[in-house]
Image (cartoon, grey):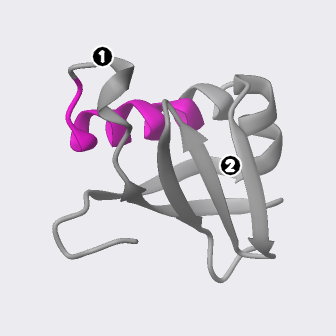
Amino acid sequence: MSDSASPSASVSLSEPTDIPAVLDRAGIDYVGVHDQRLLAIYHTGIFNIVTDPEPVSNAHTLQIDCWEAPLPSQGDEQSPQELLEDFAAVFDAGNQS
């Protein structure tokens, strides 16, 4: 699970956004935990997304934490921080459509 060295990011969206719909469009697997939280798998990394106090279906802000870094067998040279930044960029792109 997460520790204090795990990268995290706060993302502010310009308009209310349906987070599961953005992940679906990007082809990213996820599981809903409750109305304000879900877990997503991106390049074998596991990310915790919290939208509290808003529901994931109508969020203005996200807190994203990298729970598990990607498996080293992926051959990707990205650090967990770089992967988190790439993952967070999905919401910027998804918010523009």
What predominant SS class does the magenta segment belong to? Answer: helix
Residue at 75 percent across and 73 percent down: it is 33
Is the Cβ of the residue at disc 1 closer than 8 Å to that at disc 2? no
Q: Quadrant of the C terminus?
A: top right
Using the numbered discs, state the Cα–Cα distance from disc 1 to disc 2 in whole angstroms: 36 Å
For marks 1 and 2 on the same chain, the one whose residue lies earlier in the sequence: 2
Q: Give left or right: position of 8 versus 34.
A: left
Q: Which residue is mark 1?
A: 75
Residue 76 drawn above or below residue 18: above
Residue at 23 percent across and 26 percent down: it is 78
Magenta range: 78-92
Which label lies toward us, 1 or 2?
A: 1
Residue 62 seen: yes
Circle 2 packing at 10 Å, graded few (<14), some (14-19), many (20+), is: few
Q: Nearer the viewer, residue 16 or 24?
A: 24
Labelled disc at residue 15? 2
Residue 2 drawn above or below residue 81: below
Residue at 47 percent across and 36 percent down: it is 87
Q: Position of residue 56 (x, y in %)?
A: 75, 63
